[in-house]
Image (cartoon, grey):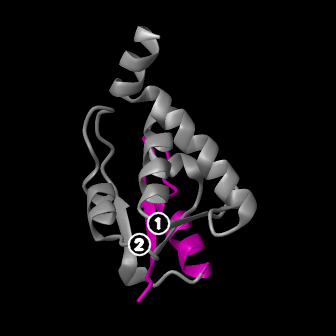
Amino acid sequence: MAVTLGYATAVPGCADLDDQLAALTAAGVDPRRVFTDRTPGSADKMRAGMLALLSYARAGDVVVVAALERLGRSAAEVTRTVADLTTRGITLRCLADGLDTATSTGRVVAKVLTDLASLDAPDSAESAHRA
């Protein structure tokens, strides 16, 4: 059975976590199925809430975020997360951006982001360097 999950994270110097949680609830996400990261960490530390979400989500599930940038602290991390979700058959919905990978346009955007993530992968860098 498909489950709708949410993810919200606090950004250093910004207290909008409550706004994100309200937006996720308004979008139909059960508050008990929202994963959060409240304590900002350094860029090299994985967030516990994100790890839990990625471990819990299964093919067919829907992950809802307030905005695409909530999926990572860098463009590379965001593209890797989108690629991971897409590859695993998990739908992604971003409320502020209007991205929904259940739509044909959303799938195209996810494909572009997945391709960008593959450029950042160590194996791709080696392959490109050899060519």
Asked if residue 116 lies left or right of residue 118, the reply is right
Say the numbered circle drawn on residue 89: 1
Which element is circle 2 on?
A: loop
Q: x, y (%) of residue 107?
A: 65, 58
Kind of residue at badge 2? Ala
Residue 90 visible to the viewer: yes
State if disc 2 and disc 1 touch (CB < 8 Å): yes
> Dot 2 surroundings within 10 Å: few (below 14), some, or many (20 or more)?
some
Asked if residue 52 lies left or right of residue 6, the reply is left
Asked if residue 47 lies left or right of residue 34, the reply is left
Q: State the extent of the magenta-drawn residues as a range.
A: 1-27
Distance from disc 1 to disc 2, alpha carbons, whole Å, reads 5 Å
| Residue closer to the observer: 15 or 49 | 49
Q: Relative to 46, is 60 above or below?
A: below
> Does the magenta-highlighted stretch encompass residue 21?
yes
Give residue 80's quadrant in the image.
top left
Residue with the most extreme right position: 105
Q: Relative to 126, is 31 above or below?
A: below
Mark 2 highlights which residue? 59
Give residue 102's quadrant in the image.
bottom right
Say the numbered circle drawn on residue 68: none
Give residue 120's quadrant in the image.
top left
Residue 74 visible to the viewer: no
Q: x, y (%) of residue 35?
A: 36, 67
> Does the magenta-highlighted stretch encompass residue 115?
no
Q: Residue at x 47, y 67 (%)?
A: 90
> Dot 1 surroundings within 10 Å: few (below 14), some, or many (20 or more)?
some
| Residue closer to the observer: 120 or 65 | 120
Which element is circle 1 on?
A: loop
Q: x, y (%) of residue 14?
A: 50, 46
